[in-house]
Amino acid sequence: MEFYKDRYPESSTKFSVVRNGYDASAVAEITPHIPAPSPLSIGYLGTLNLTIPALKNLLEGWRVARESVPGLREATLEFRGHVGAGYASGAGGHARLISEYEGCGVSYGGAVAKADVAAVYSRWNALVLALIGGEYVTSGKVYEYMATGLPILSVHEANHAACDVLDGYPLWALAEPSSPESVAAGFTSISQIAAGYDEVSRRKALDHANSFEYKRSMSSVVDHASVLARPPAEFTNQANGNQANGNQVLLQPHRDVEIPAKPVVTLIAAQRIVATTLEKNIPVLLAAGCTVRLITFHDPRSALDAIDLVHQRLTLQAFKRGRSKATRVIKRNLLAPFTAAIMKALKLPQQVDLLIRMDPTLDEWIATTDVFVALDRYAAYAANNSSQRSGHAVAILGMREITRLVTSSTQQG
């Protein structure tokens, strides 16, 4: 949500989040061992997609902890789920690395059918949540792990969205995967939590997990979505009036726009362009009398081989605005490194918009454009801002939409 609020601030109040959750039927029959027996049995269930170095740190951390922590001396670490894919399933680098630690109580037991998930969880005394990803990634596994009510050791970066979900779960420890030592400390913590595991701590853990069950998280979503999707009365009246007179084409709610005859259309692309997108739609726009221009962030030469199109690729053009050669040289040599650092720090939508602002050759394009078209969602930010700077242009998200509108206007005469 923060990602989209940042890019579409004018609509920030319209966004809401529907949290992911777990399927209660998959974990309802779990019967954990209380108190936890000795030696402990710790498990990982899911697709193993860690990098080899991260898996190496996890296994080496396990070895160190097992040799130094009394509560882990005879403990076992079992991996279940998918390792590798297709013909290489169970036979890739991950599986070979796991097999190297068999002498430390590590094993891989293969995939698990959904009907057997509860039984597998019931065998373990604690779980390992080893994840890739980061700020915007929770994984679906974290919800089901919590629903077991078992102790959980997270082995992932601290700046990870799974931490937001686990915050408040009383049987949780976090170990960053950066080194075997940090992982070993995590296994030490989780062994202590497992040693004190009882029915009271399990109930507290389940109280936290219950709020993430699918039925709870989805209970009010449908009604809320219905309210959001219902257009206001004035919008419905406007839309009906436009259909009646045929003078205007409705572009987006609360805003009617006219597509002028033979409009000047500027396309903006932040991501790489698929050639067929241009080959299929540009001829339609040209046949309708449109003047078509293209602004891109990536080099689209392969997509433009068969199309005669005016094109400008975005680069650092700010230093062309100096009036003298000396001024341009000073700006290029002294300011360029700082500008490059700023550009790197900016997110892609702002980056594309900033590059358009910095390029003096595009000033006339913006002033004379009737319709800005964003070819991808990242270009929508730049298309919207460019249309506002032009003072009269409109912004449309999608090549299909502008093709439909232009064709419709042409057919209406």
Image (cartoon, rainbow, N blue to C red):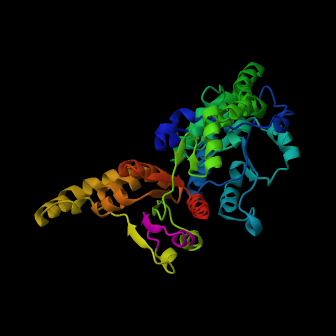
Q: Residue 20, relative to residue 400: is it above or below?
A: above
Q: Residue 116, relative to residue 338: is it above or below?
A: above
Give the x, y percent position of residue 188. 61, 35
Q: Is residue 248 left or right of residue 354?
A: right
Q: Can residue 19 be seen in this view?
A: no
Q: Is residue 342 magenta?
A: no
Give the x, y percent position of residue 62. 62, 45
**Residue sitting at 57 percent across and 70 percent down?**
284
Q: In this view, does 389 lie to the left or right of 336?
A: right
Q: Residue 308, relative to residue 135: is it above or below?
A: below
Q: Can residue 199 be seen in this view?
A: yes
**Residue sitting at 71 percent across and 27 percent down?**
211
Q: Residue furthest top?
A: 200
Quadrant of the image occupied by residue 206 = top right
Give the x, y percent position of residue 247. 56, 52
Quadrant of the image occupied by residue 156 = top right
Identify the magenta region: 284-300
Q: Which image quarter is the N terminus in? A: top right
**Residue sitting at 65 percent across and 25 percent down?**
170
Give the x, y percent position of residue 48. 68, 53
> Tag count in the figure?
0
Q: Along the line of sight, which residue is nearer the eye, 207 or 370?
A: 370
Quadrant of the image occupied by residue 237 = top right
Q: Is residue 175 left or right of residue 198?
A: left
Q: Which image quarter is the C terminus in? A: bottom right
